[in-house]
Amino acid sequence: MAESFSILDMQESPHTDAPRPAFYLDLNLNQIIDKVTSQWDNQVKKMFLYFPKNAECEAYRRAVYGDVKKAVCHEALLKFLEVAGKMEENRKQEEAVLSSMQKNVWHLWSIHHYCEAFGDLCEALQTMELTSEGMQTFLRKLKEHLASAQYQTMREQVEKVLKELMAFRFTITYEKDRMIISEGTTIGDYEAFMDKGGDRDRITLKSPFLISPNLADLENECLSVLSAKRPKMFQALKETAEKYRSFGEEFCYRFWKEIPYYLSYRAFQLDMESKGFAFCTPTAKEEEETSAEGLYDLALSIVAHREGRKVVANEFAYQKGESFFILTGPNQGGKTTFARSLGQLVFFTKMGLDVPAKKANVRYYKNILTHFSVEESIETGRGKLKEELLRLAPMMEDGEEKDFVIINELFTTAATYDAEIMGKKVLTHFVEQNCQGIYVTHLKELASAHPKVVSLRAMLNEERLQTFRIARSEAEESACAANQVNKYRLTYEQLKERL
């Protein structure tokens, strides 16, 4: 059995037939991936649903993406996809036509474009300085495949048959109710002839050896006559197509299907960078804590740019021994946006891609767990608190060591005393599991729930209005109320002025 190879996975990991992760909607990743894959098929979108198997596999992807980003490599891969795409067009034509002869012709064209696509790509990649294990391994395997006797014989036989077919010419003379078919060339237009003497109930026709739909009756009759006169040529067509009914290497087809994962994100990244948004390749140093500079919510940025709104970037850094950020502050101060940006940072790092920040180091996390505030369920009749607990239970049971956890406004409908007790238990559980994360809450008491917890706050300016900047700071009891009073000009002095 041939050695399996994937440009996505260093080790096989299931990235098909699995449900979408729960955090996908919480982090607005669906909006981002829809944008990334808008020009690609659903198979490409599916590749963004599943993490690589481990930290080593994440690094494998990140290195491949580093090669893909190089201008010469990127250009060669786009050209490869363009030529390889003709194989799919040929396959569709092969299925659509009725004539067995035409099916064989289209099959040989598929082989021709297979050889052209991978041959040109191999030639281009050999001139580049590829640094990733994935691209180096692919090039090595491709060179071996193209140099094999089996491939060389197939290519030579297919090209020989196609060359003979393309050079073959015949004339049709139609006069006095007689039709004469003979080899050779003549002056005149085939379609004009068909308009005069051919089957009128047909679509526009071209050479049966080129891009054409099904043959008209006249064309079938012509080919029947010609195949009797040139039996060797038509026999060679049939035998060659049958001999190579199955062609190509599995790793080549897999590369063709998987490389759009990187190319789709690269196209998206280049578009966002042209609009002024920063991206960087994150480091993944375990000896350093997770941190980022110039971090922003990518989903929000897509919408904000379209609407002409500014996006505020933030920075953060876990210090040694810290597990959780407790983020408090006024409503609509950017707390949830910041929490989402942390989740997106971890997600795209795990996917081996560049992240929306100017600089970042992200340690390895096994998974992302999220719990965002939910509404009461009309269908089940359950209250909001019960809905939250039902979703939280499996999250706490199934969570593993080194998960990244994002909790947003939990237990808001419970009494403050009860919410504080439950919140501390949730925090303690994840801290003791050696997880890291962020807990967005209105309860400032949670900032002192555990020695490994640190307080962040959504900051206000001197006028007590939102800045959407997040910084280390002690929680303020009245931050939310003061913000709303100032935002809507409801201070004592402002109300007095109106009266």
Image (cartoon, rainbow, N blue to C red):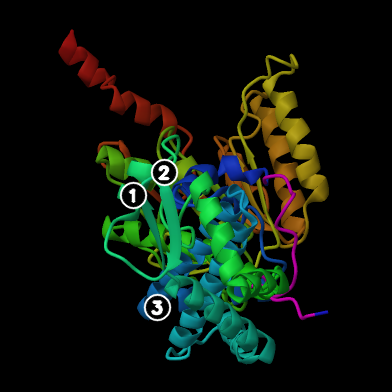
Query: Residue at the spot x=56%, y=40% of the render?
Result: 444
Q: Quadrant of the C terminus?
A: top left
The magenta segment is 2-20
Q: Is residue 422 left or right of residue 407?
A: right
Label ID, residue 70: 3
**Residue 77 in view, yes or no:** yes
Q: Is residue 476 above or below residue 497?
A: below
200 relative position to 240: left or right: left
Which badge, 2 or 3, comes first in the chain's sequence?
Answer: 3
* Badge 2 amino acid: Gly
Q: Are marks 1 and 2 in contact (CB under 8 Å)?
A: yes
The residue singled out by tag 2 in the image is 198
Q: Spatial distance from mark 1 to mark 3, Cα to Cα?
A: 52 Å
Residue 415 image offset from top left, x and y in percent: 67, 23
How many neighbours does mark 1 have within 10 angstroms: few (below 14), some (14-19), or many (20 or more)? few
Mark 2 neighbour density, 10 Å: few (under 14) some (14–19) many (20 or more):
some
Q: Quadrant of residue 481?
A: top left
